[in-house]
Image: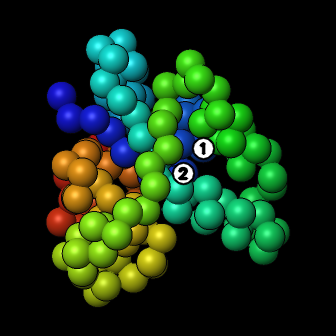
């Protein structure tokens, strides 16, 4: 079982409203936790949430929830930095398929690290990355 990288909305929904996740996504997340397989979220997800809060598109609660979850030493989710080696992987995520740069970085992180990306985003599902929804 591959480790999972949660897309921004997936991480927020998992923490705040798991019923919004697909049955398959929630089942894989729970199976990962039960089997000790890590769940990850990219730092770009937090940066994206800061931006969305600043623009007034989302309330601050989801960002705060994610920060708390990531700061909890017993948390199920671990944050991944953006490493220089992700640059090559970004170039493999075609801009025509995934035009949003935060999404490309998330997809590139999954591709580079061999992670399955949990996302509802259709553009990401049609990219070069293994996705779950």
**Which colouring convention does the figure follow?**
rainbow
**Tag count:** 2
Is residue 13 in view?
no
**Neighbour class for label 2 at 10 Å: few (<14), some, many (≥20)?**
some
Name the residue that disc number 1 marks.
Answer: 12
> Outermost residue toward the front?
84
Depth check, front residue: 130 or 78:
78
Cα–Cα gap, marks 2 and 1: 5 Å
Q: 10 Å neighbourhood of mark 1: few (<14), some, or many (≥20)? A: many
Question: In the rendered view of the protein, which quadrant contains the N terminus?
Answer: top left
Q: Residue at x 24, y 80 (%)?
A: 91
> Outermost residue toward the bottom?
96
In the rendering, at what x and y percent does residue 59 appear? 81, 55
Answer above or below: position of 20 versus 76.
below
In the image, is residue 17 above or below residue 124? Answer: above
Residue at the image position 48 percent from the left and 37 percent from the top: 78
Which residue is painted at 49% across and 25% down in the image? Answer: 76
Quarter of the figure with residue 110: bottom left
Residue 9's disc number: 2
Return the mark for residue 3.
Answer: none
Element marked by disc 2: helix
At x 70%, y 35%, the residue is 68
For the residue pair 113 and 16, the one nearer the viewer reads as 113
Give left or right: position of 84 versus 114.
Answer: right
**Foreground pick, 111 / 84:** 84
Q: Is residue 7 visible?
A: yes
Which quarter shows the C terminus?
A: top left
Give yes or no for contact between labels 2 and 1 (Cβ–Cβ under 8 Å). yes
Image coords of residue 104 (percent x, y): 37, 71
Left or right for 11, reference 103: right
């Amino acid at each position: 079982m591959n480790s999972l990288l949660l897309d921004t909305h997936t991480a927020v929904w998992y923490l705040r409203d798991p019923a919004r996740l697909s049955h398959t996504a929630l089942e894989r997340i729970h199976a990962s936790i039960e089997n000790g397989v890590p769940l990850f979220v990219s730092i770009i997800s937090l940066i994206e949430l800061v931006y969305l809060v600043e623009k007034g598109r989302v309330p601050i609660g989801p960002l705060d929830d994610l920060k708390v979850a990531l700061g909890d030493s017993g948390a199920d989710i671990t944050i991944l930095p953006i490493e220089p080696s992700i640059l090559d992987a970004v170039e493999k995520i075609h801009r025509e398929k995934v035009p949003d740069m935060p999404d490309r970085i998330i997809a590139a992180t999954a591709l580079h690290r061999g992670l399955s990306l949990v996302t509802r985003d259709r553009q990401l599902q049609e990219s070069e990355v293994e996705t779950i929804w």
